[in-house]
């Protein structure tokens, strides 16, 4: 989960909610620049965090009893295997993108070394099954990673005020993209989307209580908290 501390308590966006927001950006990508395996790329973008379900998974709390932000979580072999199994039962191109994302997020962790080595050994076979090429796979993953990065910047509430530009990531073909915010409006530079203006939304759960004794206590609170829907407008010019 993505956790932000505010004056009124915790603001929480679920991992799956963040993934859905990433897919909203991906879905609007310029038609002329979309990867050939477009639908599969979009589905992989939406589901790249689907194994991490806060209503089921644990641990959810830090040592001090607060909700644990996603970047505090170490590599989880069981969750990663579940994520790969979910992808493989869709198709092997989605599995390849998912494996790339696991390597991107956990590549520097010693505990992930064996798991990632196994994924690399299977990549050549999976690419034959998927009938794809390294270049095609790279281009699709670059788009997924860019949309994931933009979603994370928004869900963490770290966009810069006063229209100050913030780097998102490199996208397909190595282009570096930036985001500028004014109120509830965003501009991505250079503009990569098909339409000149569109809206996206995501859900935030606000929890006033700061500490919890157990994961179960926190999970019950998270389940019973109705989220607030946040809507943003993306436009070519603020």
Image (cartoon, rainbow, N blue to C red):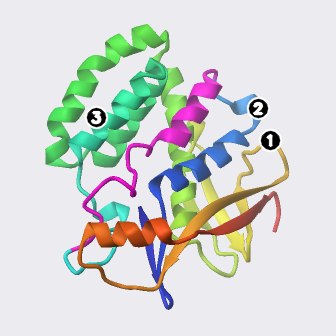
* Vertical order, 208 against 74 (above or below): below
Disc 1: CA contacts within 10 A as few (<14), some (14-19) or many (>=20): some
Residue position marked by numbered label 3 in the rendering: 81
Residue position marked by numbered label 1 in the rendering: 194
Name the image quarter holding residue 28.
top right
Residue found at x 29% / y 43%: 79
Disc 2: CA contacts within 10 A as few (<14), some (14-19) or many (>=20): few
Of tags 3 and 2, which is closer to the observer?
3
Asked whether the residues under the numbered discs 3 and 1 touch, taking CB atoms below 8 Å apart as contact, a structural biologist would say no
Residue found at x 40% / y 23%: 88
Q: Position of residue 35 (x, y in %)?
A: 63, 27
Q: Is 50 contained in the magenta span? A: yes
Q: Position of residue 237 (x, y in %)?
A: 82, 63
| Residue 139 seen from this side | yes
Residue position marked by numbered label 2 in the rendering: 31
In terms of sequence position, does the residue under pointer 3 or pointer 2 come before the other? Answer: 2
In terms of sequence position, does the residue under pointer 3 or pointer 1 come before the other? Answer: 3
Name the image quarter holding residue 143.
top right
* Vertical order, 120 against 156 (above or below): above
In terms of sequence position, does the residue under pointer 1 or pointer 2 come before the other? Answer: 2
Q: Is residue 82 left or right of residue 31?
A: left
* Vertical order, 223 against 86 (above or below): below
Name the mark on residue 45: none
The stretch of residues the image draws in magenta is 36-62
């Amino acid at each position: 989960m993505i956790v932000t501390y505010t004056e009124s308590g915790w603001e929480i966006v679920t991992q799956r909610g963040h993934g859905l927001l990433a897919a909203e950006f991906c879905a609007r990508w310029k038609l002329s620049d979309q990867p050939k395996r477009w639908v599969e790329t979009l589905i992989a973008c939406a589901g790249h965090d689907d194994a991490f379900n806060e209503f089921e998974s644990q641990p959810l709390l830090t040592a001090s009893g607060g909700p644990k932000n996603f970047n505090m979580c170490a590599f989880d072999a069981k969750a990663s295997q579940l994520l790969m199994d979910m992808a493989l039962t869709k198709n092997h191109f989605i599995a390849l993108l998912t494996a790339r994302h696991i390597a991107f997020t956990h590549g520097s962790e010693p505990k992930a070394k064996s798991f990632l080595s196994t994924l690399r050994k299977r990549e050549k076979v999976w690419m034959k099954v998927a009938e794809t090429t390294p270049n095609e796979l790279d281009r699709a993953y670059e788009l997924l990673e860019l949309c994931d990065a933009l979603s994370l910047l928004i869900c963490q509430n770290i966009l810069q005020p006063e229209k100050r530009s913030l780097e998102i990531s490199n996208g397909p073909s190595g282009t570096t993209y930036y985001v500028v915010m004014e109120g509830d409006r965003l501009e991505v530079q250079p503009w990569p989307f098909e339409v000149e203006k569109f809206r996206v939304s995501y859900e935030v759960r606000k929890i006033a209580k700061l500490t919890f004794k157990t994961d179960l206590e926190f999970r019950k609170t998270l389940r019973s908290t109705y989220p607030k829907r946040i809507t943003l407008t993306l436009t070519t010019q603020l």
